[in-house]
Amino acid sequence: DDGRFLYVPCDADEQTRQATAAVERAFKDGITRQTVRLALVREGKSTMEDEEWPGGAREMYREAGRPLTEELLRMVRAQPPMKELSTDEADQKETENERQLNKMLPPDVKAEDIWDFDGSALITAKAAGGPSADVCAMVFPNTDVKYLNDIQSMDEQMKERLFLLVNPFWRNVDSWGFNILAPNAKKRAQEVVFDDDKFIETYVMLRFSARGERCVALKVYPYDWQLYAYLEDDSRSYGGNIVEEAVRLGASKDEPTSAQFTDLLNERPEFKMSRNMRQINRMM
């Protein structure tokens, strides 16, 4: 397990840097279609904090989905590998100049709403050195057939360039239940999204609760899932609150379950007492 050096990002900036590195590694390995699932964190907030979205998907997109994706696309550099060199010296120089511009200058990032009422959008990054390194991300697509059409269309347009799905509202092909208005939607989703290892998950940060503990599952390409739980450090405080550190519990080849986390927590002496009991002990 080579992913034991990974860390849980404490804020949006750290998450963006970690996701950028994972996306770029995968792209260099030839993976041009990727799924990224970011922890939806507002600017200036900690990844440990529980966010509430009374405005639903539109608020999630406005406050987190869009700014996080825009920053990710500003940082990602996805220059396709050099093709067989031309014998024309001028062509070689022009290609190298484009690559240097793409490395040095940030892309022009723009967002275009797909459907405003469900917070979905297409965010594009036009590379400074030319279109060969352009990047596109679809944010918050869901199981409506329209998104399958849009994904297929963008897939054809982007060719060998990087195309991301960011926080799609599905987990797997079974998310497409039977729809009398679109009886072939599940089959089409399999073909458009899942066949041929399309849109594999290259970066995922999942936050959830297991046995009353705040837990994180982190997938950072090319490493296995890394599993963590937050534990209070009684020797440190900030702003009157005890600092919590992410303790690594282990790793998993597949996406972990709550039951798997519970078993790992039960094996660790520092989590022998529940979170509530630890809080009560500190007050005594």
Image (cartoon, rainbow, N blue to C red):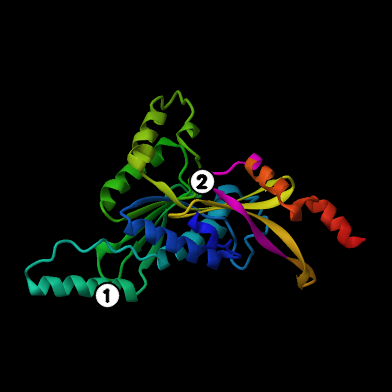
- The foreground one among 71 and 53 is 71
Question: Compared to 281, does 188 lie above or below?
Answer: above
Residue at image coords 79%, 50%: 274
Asked if residue 123 lies in the magenta stretch, the reply is no
Kindly give the residue lying farthest to the right in the view shown.
Answer: 284
Residue at image coords 13%, 66%: 85
Badge 1 marks a residue whose secondary structure is helix
Number of residues whose C-alpha sits closer than 10 Å to that of mark 1, classed few (under 14), some (14–19) or many (20 or more):
few
Residue 225, given in percent of the width and then of the height, sits at 52, 50
Badge 2 marks a residue whose secondary structure is helix
Marks 1 and 2, the one that precedes in the sequence: 1
- The foreground one among 41 and 220 is 220
Image-quadrant location for residue 123: bottom left
Q: Which mark is residue 100?
A: 1
For disc 2, the marked residue is: 118
Question: Compared to 282, does 273 lie above or below?
Answer: above
Name the side, left or right, on which 265 lies relative to 217. Answer: right
Name the side, left or right, on which 2 lies relative to 56. Answer: left
Looking at the picture, which amino acid does disc 1 mark? Gln
Residue 207, given in percent of the width and then of the height, sits at 62, 51
- Determine if residue 167 is in view: yes
Give the number of the mark in front: 1 or 2. Answer: 1
